[in-house]
Image (spheres, helix red, strand yellow):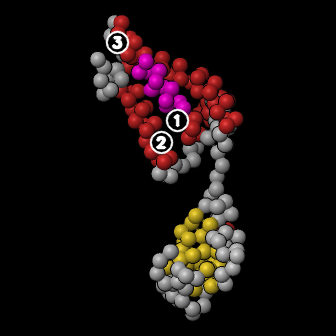
Amino acid sequence: MLGLFQPALLPFTAALGLLLLLLLLQLIGLDGDLPGGGEDGIGAALDWLNAGRLPLLILAVVMLALFASAGFGLQFAAAAVAGPLPWPLAAGLATALAIPVTRALSRPLARILPLDETTAVDIDSLLGRRARILAGTARAGHAARAEVIDAHGQRHFVMVEPAGTAELTAQTLLLLVSRDGPAFQAVAIPEDVFSELKV
């Protein structure tokens, strides 16, 4: 019986570990955009795999899953017949199987999954938006942490100080009016039917 950490299975165990790590990062929200495209060899390979039609993180997950599955399948089948294949040969065969299947699967997946889309915003685009202090009191020269929602509905946490001499608390709805370095200046605005953290 082959163990997951025997040399014959090590590339596929590593791929499985990386797959689980990517899924974990996705679950806790620490995933990032993976680079791709371009005119070089890597960019051309990604284009061939339909990277422009599917988020690269999804493409990586599919590729790793297929590579690990093919590798484990090959090695267990070989072990049952005459013994496991040398890992470089098994890895090459698994790659040869995984790449065209990844390309074939990417087209139907692209129809049901959204394209890569960035919601990154310029920090100054938060000016003019409503905010709430999360804890503490903002005074002149003493910033407090606040939450603001951008145009994409994403939450941002910023430091705010009052634009004047008034103290600002978590009970006050704020409007971000200017920025000085990392801190925003805010003024209190009345509560009304539009007082949610969005414009």
For image coordinates 50% across by 22% down, the residue present is: 95
Distance (Cα) linking label 3 and label 2: 30 Å
For image coordinates 57% across by 66% down, the residue present is: 156
Q: Specify the quadrant that holds the C terminus.
A: bottom right
Left or right? Give the position of 167 relative to 114. left
Q: How crowded is mark 3: few (under 14 residues within 10 Å), some or many (20 or more)?
A: some
Name the kind of residue labelled 1 in the image. Answer: Val
Q: What stretch is highlighted in magenta?
A: 61-73
- The answer to whether marks 2 and 1 mark residues whose Cβ atoms lie closer than 8 Å is yes
| Element type where label 2 sits in the image | helix
List the single residue furthest toward the front: 193
Residue 57 screen position, x and y as percent:
56, 40
For image coordinates 38% across by 11% down, the residue present is: 78
Left or right? Give the position of 115 relative to 17. right
Residue 147 screen position, x and y as percent:
56, 71
Q: Specify the quadrant that holds the N terminus.
A: top left
Distance (Cα) linking label 2 and label 1: 8 Å
Q: Residues within 10 Å of mark 2 (few under 14, many from 20)?
A: some
Name the kind of residue labelled 3 in the image. Answer: Ala
The residue that disc 2 covers is 23
The residue that disc 3 covers is 79
Pointer 3 or 2: first along the chain:
2
Asked if residue 44 lies in the magenta stretch, the reply is no
| Element type where label 3 sits in the image | helix
The residue that disc 1 covers is 61
